Amino acid sequence: MNNYSVFQGFQSAEINTLKRLLHSEEQVFPKNSTIMKSSESEQNCAVILHGVAYLVRKNDFGENKLIDYFEQEQFFSAAFSPYKNGNLYTFVAKKDCTVLSFSHRWMYPSGETIDPLLLRFLQNIMRSVSIRQKIHIDILHRQSIREKLVTCFRYLKGDGNHLRLSFPLSDLSDYLGIDRSAMMREIKKMNSDGMILSKGPDITLL
């Protein structure tokens, strides 16, 4: 899923022009710091330039649960994340992050003809967000833990058979919506059955 860059098809000079059109700024967020929070008035959008960010939600027991994650050149926005009755979602830097931050109002200025670069950028955002959401839905729709794991690994592996998770296995269970202990048992079984070879975040599909 880290192949869905919002800068796909852009040259370096065009990206620099796009940054000016968006009135954007680069910001650095240390590991575990909050990048932005969802709210009814939030207008901020961002693209990860370096690092990994989590979208997390605090559950009824006060635990932060991973909802989604974002890697290099992927887009996220507090303006488009769920928010109702104080149900707060937060974007957190899982690793040290450099983020391109801008307001969503610059993406579609009212009363003006939209710049072709902004239009291409919007199209890339819609494509990236749509594909990522469909992939996540496809994974969550699978009935068994093994089906969810295999489907997730197949999406993540790209062209080869090897993949390296961007986050610990302990967080993968949140992303898949399954019990952590049950997931670890299933991964152990998949290793024993010769389906995968795993060591921490490194996984090879056999």
Image: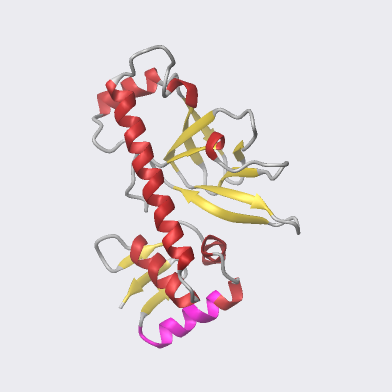
Given residues 49 and 111, the one toward you in this image is: 111
Looking at the image, is 168 positioned above or below residue 68? below
How many labels, in total?
A: 0
Residues drawn in magenta: 183-194
In the figure, residue 100 lies in which quadrant? top left
Q: Quadrant of residue 170?
A: bottom right
> Residue at image x 42%, y 82%?
190
**Type of secondary structure dominating the magenta stretch:** helix
Identity of the residue drawn at 40% across and 51% down: 132
Residue at point 48%, 74% (across, down): 143
Left/right of residue 27 with respect to residue 58 in the rendered view: left
Q: Is residue 146 above or below residue 162?
A: below
- The extreme right residue here reads 61
Picture coordinates of residue 99, whole percent (x, y): 47, 34
* Viewer-nearest residue: 129 or 14: 129
Q: Residue at x 64, y 32 (%)?
A: 40
In this rendering, the answer to whether 16 lies above or below 71 is: above
Q: Can residue 142 be seen here?
A: yes
Image quadrant occupied by the C terminus: bottom left
- Could you tell me residue 172's position as x and y percent? 52, 64
Q: Does 53 lie within the magenta span?
A: no
User: Furthest-bottom residue in view?
Assistant: 193
| Horizontal arrangement in the rendering, residue 189 relative to residue 9 (left or right) | right
- Rendered image coloring scheme: secondary structure
Q: Residue furthest front?
A: 111
Residue 165 makes an appearance in the image = no
Q: Position of residue 89 (x, y in %)?
A: 63, 44
Say whether residue 187 is magenta. Answer: yes
- Percent across and percent down for residue 44 are 54, 29
Judged left or right of residue 5, residue 133 is right
